[in-house]
Amino acid sequence: MTLPLGFVVEFDRHTRVVDDGRALLGGHPTRMLKLTPRARRLLTGRTLVVRDAAGALLADRLLETGLAHPVAGSLPTPGDPRYTVVVPVRDRPRQLDRLLRSIEPGRPVIVVDDASRQPAAVAATAARHGARLVALTANVGPAEARNAGLRLVATPYVVFADSDIVLDPDTVPTLLRHFADPLVAMAVPRITGLTAPATTWIERYENSRSSLDLGTHPAPVRPGTPVSWASSACVVARVDVLGAGFDAGMRVGEDVDLCWRLVAAGRRVRYEPAVRAAHEHRVRLGDWLLRKAVYGTGAQPLAERHPRSVAPVVFAPWSTVLAVTLLAGRRWSAPVAVAVLGAVTVRIARKLDGTRHPYRLAVRLTGNGALATLSQTSALLTRHWWPLTAVGCAFSGRVRRAAAVAALADIALEYRRDQATLDPLRYAVARRLDDLAYGAGVWFAALRARSGTALRPRVTR
């Protein structure tokens, strides 16, 4: 399967052009891709348009390594763009009505009522919009509810949309363009808050840092990368590659599982933030905390199915040494950390031998790695391992200092990155509550399963 003529890709924002275009540096994991003179002629600035087999081969390589992403607006639409919308719902007729009003008229819609307590209201809403209703007699959860709708789909593509979603007019048409790449199995938009003014400080926090919002930059969805999963709140997928669909045994994390199974099968999942789907965030503190904890419980069933893809942090050997050294907080910590960074810089520079400025590039890469190490260590202390941190704080001043630095540094970095509309104090409180609730869910599920897989860091080369 090759990319079609006219397919357009553009370098990722972090991809660096090295030595006047002789090589590219970037991707996940970071690598250097050397370009032949013929390959360099295929590029126009930071863009590549597929015009022949060589261009298709290079574009595919750039996509696979994360060095470049498709330019969705420039891609052709599928030859048969028909799709069916499947909506799993339990009660919430008001939200269902709002979603169905946002769907393009004339599109087939299947509403799967997952044993609502007031089924008549859901049935009336579906009938008012001409949607096909599938009424389940037992509550089976969103995964199996979607599967029940999927089994009735007769179009090449399916759109899964939760009832608390509102679709923009160009969301589905733009996502369909990604299927010009024959390896793409699924494409997802950015999930943002509804445009109505936020009513609570929790909603304002969610509007800037929702768990469903994967950011402003396009990305492949792959475990171990900046966008390692995608929510099923809004998904466009090829029907013929989904098989039986979601894992019916999972009531949370089923969307992550499906993404990872598709990737493991050699397919691609694309995140496209150029288009959006609006989500009705939870605005009451208790509901919000419960949802965060529920998200955390999904780590354990995912660890059972994908043990190498679920880890609170992923360290290289050198970053493990760096993290342990800094956490030790001894007099020797700083010089040892400097020595580790220096050795890593030299090692990377040797691998970059042949470029014009190997040490300059190596310093940049080492610095990025060090920042990633500090960020992951901070998350480990304040989010995934916070119960252990809390116990340590009761007995050790060194742990208290490390936890305080981690929490403050995390808030300082993330507040600016999120461009939050919430004041720093309430943002800090919401951020810590977010981490506490999620971490509690992870530990609850791990203890119930008597397994530490979801809590175990992974060290990889």
Image (tube, grey):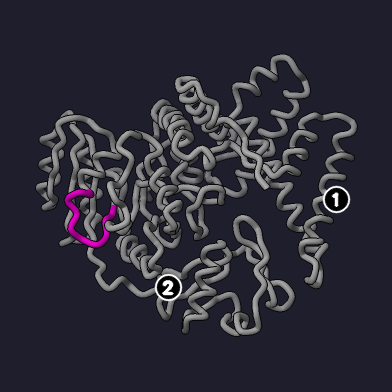
Tell me the distance, in whole angstroms, between the alpha carbons under discs 1 and 2: 43 Å
Residue 156 lies within the magenta run: yes
Residue 88 placement (x, y as % from top left): 24, 42
Among the 4 quarters of the image, the one containing residue 453: top right
Which residue lies at the image location 74% right of the left edge and 47% below the top edge? 370
Secondary element type, mark 2: loop
Q: Is residue 386 above or below residue 408?
A: above
Which class describes the residues within 10 Å of circle 2: few (<14), some (14-19), or many (20+)?
few
Helix, strand or loop at label 1? It is helix
Q: Is residue 201 visible?
A: no
Query: Eyeballing the image, is 289 above or below 197?
Result: above
309 or 419: nearer the eye?
A: 309
Q: Position of residue 359 (x, y in %)?
A: 83, 62
Q: Which residue is mark 2?
A: 2
Can residue 20 be seen in the rendering of this structure? yes
Q: Quadrant of residue 315?
A: top right
The amino acid type of the residue labelled 2 equals Thr
Q: Which residues are magenta?
A: 150-159
Using the image, tell me which numbered label, if any, was put on residue 13. none
Image check: 108 left or right of 41?
Answer: left
Image spot of residue 224 (x, y percent): 56, 48
Residue where numbered disc 1 is placed: 342
Which residue is depicted at the point 14% across and 31% down?
137
Asked if marks 1 and 2 touch (Cβ < 8 Å), the reply is no
Of 453 and 129, the residue lying toward us = 453
Q: Please identify, in this view, whether the residue under mark 1 or under mark 2 is nearer the observer.
A: 2
Left or right: residue 348 compared with residue 296: right
**Residue at 18% of width from left, 32% of height from top?**
115
Q: Main secondary structure of the magenta part?
A: loop
